[in-house]
Amino acid sequence: MGPQQPALDELKRRACESVELNAARLGELSRSIWRRPELAYQEHHAHDAMTGFFSGAELPGAAWAVRPRYKLDTAFRAEWGTAAPGPRPLRVAFLCEYDALPGIGHACGHNLIAEVGAAAALGLKAALESLPQPAPVAVQVTVLGTPAEEQGGGKIDLINAGAFDGLDVVFMAHPSQENAAYLPDVAEHECYHVSEDTEFLCKANKRHSSEEFILGFILLDMLSVTVKYYGKASHAAAYPWEGVNALDAAVLAYNNLSVLRQQMKPTWRVHGEIFIKSDIQHVEIKGGKNDYYNVLPNKSLEKIYKENGKKLGIEFISEDCILNGLSGSTDFGNVTFVVPGLHPYFYIGSDALNHTEQYTEAAGSQNAQFYALRTAKALAMTALDVIFNPDLLEQVREDFRQVKLKEEGQLHPVVTDKKPDAGVGACASR
């Protein structure tokens, strides 16, 4: 039996107090990552900042066991646990992302994701350490540093390496323009197909050289297709008619597909990029990145998270806005296929859109700190509910089993148009 509600409320208060006590060092951790943005699999400064943070002697309570370069060069694992009789501890994990975007830095606020994960873990640990006697079940608190969410799918690499084996529940929160316990995401399954059927001869008026233009369109929630346009070199001034122009063909295809998007349903996504490769005799075509799966909802976790968030003053968007809205793709979706997880979104004090320079500025602002730490408190409080309410834990596991079973049957469906036509409405929360 866990503590009665007054005792559980006191543990939650202690968790929130710990987050506040560590606010200054948590804010500096976030700003350190924000000031030095790093791309996927290159987050060496962020890795060192995070491992240094959890290895620091200034953190209150018992020391964390920190494993740098855990299974990936820029991943890490930090653990702390309680002692109690029993065959195995209950393992609760908080995930930290910290990769940035090319050219515009932390325009998706991953520095805040790292801060929230660290803060929630500190809060939960402090609450458990404050117990006058050991908890009835041993608890292991894990922090996983997961690189390369924007490009590559670091969490998928870690899943394949066994990093998530044995975990019971995982938590992570993502910056956004609103507060939501869950948003439907747009999964991204990417694979490259290069064959005779997808190679088109077009004109290329390039002087004394041969070029290949690759037009790659990503169809979110389906797959990506790479179309290769091969050119033929000729002298652009002396005899251009002998050439075959691959660039013109690629540009025309891109423009035509772009124009087509105005006739597409609001829930459809088609994005394209043009890659220029010189000297086609030495071009290497590499496979695509990991597939990103849909984040599986967990109604039991979402309900408790919202209850805790509302106690802290978080205002959540309506259910209608959730059903009609879409978030971006994330490799956290793959995590929810191997362990029950919660992936809420949180407002950071700005109406700027993710992946913009304005959001980069907002993610590094002092204003964002209040909202990030408030979210961390709600995560820690929710983790305490899971730990001390065995019935809730079983509901979480049952939600996971049922939703996973349903989703796995739809990973490769016949494409039908069953999604609502309405796009994202004017939904806001603070």
Image (cartoon, helix red, strand yellow):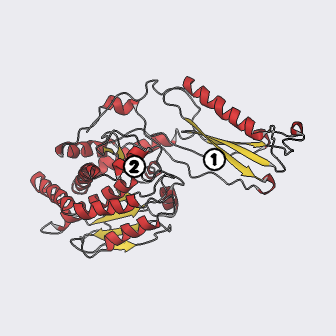
Give amino acid for label 1.
Cys
Give whichever of discs 1 and 2 has the lower sequence position.
1
Disc 2 marks which residue?
360
Q: Residue at x 51, y 58 (%)?
A: 40
Residue 92 visible in this rendered orientation of the protein: no
Judge whether 87 appears above or below 290 on screen. below
Closest to the observer: 240 or 176?
240
Within-10-Å neighbours for mark 1: few <14, some 14–19, many 20+: some
Q: Residue at x 28, y 44 (%)?
A: 349
Across and down, in percent, residue 341 comes to: 37, 50
Mark identifier at residue 124: none
Q: Residue furthest left?
A: 6
Mark identifier at residue 191: 1
- Quadrant assignment, res 384: bottom left
Across and down, in percent, residue 199 comes to: 78, 41
Disc 1/disc 2 C-alpha distance (Å): 30 Å
Q: Secondary structure at mark 2?
A: helix
Closest to the observer: 151 or 127?
151
Classify the position of the N terminus by image quarter: bottom left
Within-10-Å neighbours for mark 2: few <14, some 14–19, many 20+: many
Closest to the observer: 308 or 88?
308
